[in-house]
Amino acid sequence: MLTSPYSRPEFDPYGSNDVPDSSSGHWKAPRAHGSVTGSLQIPGSKSLTNRELVLAALADSPSTIRRPLHSRDSRLMIEALRSLGTVIEEVPGLGSFGPDWKITPSELIGSTTIDCGLAGTVMRFMPPVAALALGPTTFDGDEGARKRPMATTISSLRALGVDIADEGRGSLPFTVHGTGTVEGGMLTIDASSSSQFVSGLLLAAARFEQGLDLTHSGERLPSLPHIEMTLEVLRKRGVQVSNPEVGHWIVQPGVIAAIDVDIEPDLSNAAPFLAAAVVTGGSVTISGWPQVTTQVGNDLLEILPLFGASVSRDGDKVTVSGKTDQSGKPVISGITLDLTTGGELAPAIIAIAALASSPSTITGIGHIRHHETDRLAALATEINKLGGNVTELEDGLHIEPAELHGGVWLSYEDHRMATSGAIIGLVVDGVEVENIGTTSKTLPEFPELWKELVEPSL
Ligand SMILES: O=C(O)C1=C[C@@H](OP(=O)(O)O)[C@@H](O)[C@H](O)C1
Ligand SMILES: C=C(OP(=O)(O)O)C(=O)O
């Protein structure tokens, strides 16, 4: 079992732990010599941590969040809630990746600025909370965050009677002029470009005077499991929420209960580690895998076998083993997959597909052009730079088999682009990942956990 870097005093879970080890200043992706075999634990889920932080701040009394994710995205959420008056303290816990948090709600007061960094969960979940605060709250973030779609958040809050000043941009920066209450009621929005528009409204809706009767009307609704996750965390806190039909949710006004919660490991962040088994014909075990979960990362257990891998389960341990031929060489088949529900898995899936011996077509993920970067363009560009043969489709990628060679893999400030470069670098000589430290967005331990898995004896 790999140890947690969190135990080392110099480790900073909120900063960059990039240790460049090549003359170019980039991170030399560890090259697997033979099959990768090992077991590890994965830190807490970003999506669950940031939902529980918001709900704990809106609840009726203090809550404890156990085994939370300590990363840039969760730190940004903590700072955002603190700046509105919530008290968040570290308390000792049993998790391997840092302390627990005690969250004590208080009256929400604006007159502050919230830095969203590049976190979709902060920029889409916090404006409805700021609307419940008394006083103005200005939202801004990284340069890349200013390009991410925010118009639906802005227009939906306006439709609920909230005054927002955005100078017509429909993106960050903007100011929410909170008055302490939101009327709520019926609302129709277009959440085609992100499920987070729906989740953000639902999370705060029990605190609206009339609750919320929300309908999605648009060409597609991506990442439905993330909306299911929102419904589940609300129900656990006693909120009455129903989903009478696809794209329609009703939240009754009422109290959000304070409860102590355990955060599941981030199953989407398990993707690169499990991919290491698939592309090297090895075997990787993740412990702490939940029996039942709304996390879309659980779909990896059905997706990875399409490439030829096998999956086994022993209690809370899940093992993925890559397929090999008689000489032990990895065998990876291409796949055809609609990934509408699991866009955040796309970078890892596409990295595996780029190493397959037959073509792959991954569709249903047009909206990931609006993630940390335009992920379809970024993946096609970086794989093709290494000799790949990837074609961009309107809503996905087509990948033809090709012999890849080394080179610099750019990360575009995108944690999942960085980890995709690491997957390819396992089996291609001379891949260097620019800005591996960007993994601190959701998995600051990545460079260290990866090295321990790939080069355990070094
Ligand atoms: O609600 C959430 O926690 C998330 C929802 C999804 O967003 P999109 O619907 O924009 O893909 C997902 O990709 C993102 O990583 C996290
Ligand atoms: C899309 C992602 O992040 P965000 O929560 O910033 O939208 C992601 O983590 O893949």
Image (cartoon, rainbow, N blue to C red):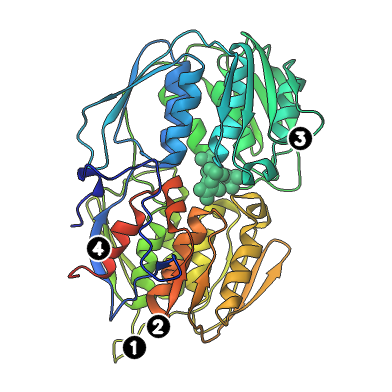
What separation in Å lies between label 3 and label 4 (alpha carbons)? Answer: 44 Å
Q: Quadrant of residue 138?
A: top right
Q: Residue furthest bottom?
A: 327
Which amino acid, mark 3? Gly
Count residues near mark 1 (Cα–Cα under 10 Å), then give few for <14, some for 14-19, many for 20+: few
Q: Quadrant of residue 212?
A: top right
User: Does residue 45 appear left or right of residue 228 in this picture?
Assistant: left
Which amino acid, mark 2? Val
Tell whether label 1 touches label 3 (CB within 8 Å): no
Which callout, 2 or 1, points at the residue further toward the start of the chain?
1
Q: Which residue is mark 2?
A: 331
**Which mark's residue is nearer the viewer, 3 or 1?**
3
The structure residue drawn at horizontal position 46% and vertical position 70%, both measured from the top left corner, is: 24
Q: Secondary structure at mark 1?
A: loop
Which callout, 2 or 4, points at the residue further toward the start of the chain?
2
**Which mark's residue is nearer the viewer, 1 or 4?**
4
Count residues near mark 3 (Cα–Cα under 10 Å), then give few for <14, some for 14-19, many for 20+: some
Q: Which residue is mark 1?
A: 325
Q: Which residue is mark 3?
A: 170
**Which mark's residue is nearer the viewer, 3 or 2?**
3
Q: Residue furthest front?
A: 23
**Which mark's residue is nearer the viewer, 2 or 4?**
4
Q: Secondary structure at mark 4?
A: helix
User: Does residue 447 appear left or right of residue 230 in this picture?
Assistant: left
Q: Which residue is mark 4?
A: 452
User: Does residue 36 appear left or right of residue 388 in this picture?
Assistant: left
- State yes or no: Cβ of the residue under disc 3 lies below 8 Å from any atom of ligand 1: no
What separation in Å lies between label 2 and label 1 (alpha carbons)? Answer: 6 Å
Tell whether label 1 touches label 2 (CB within 8 Å): yes
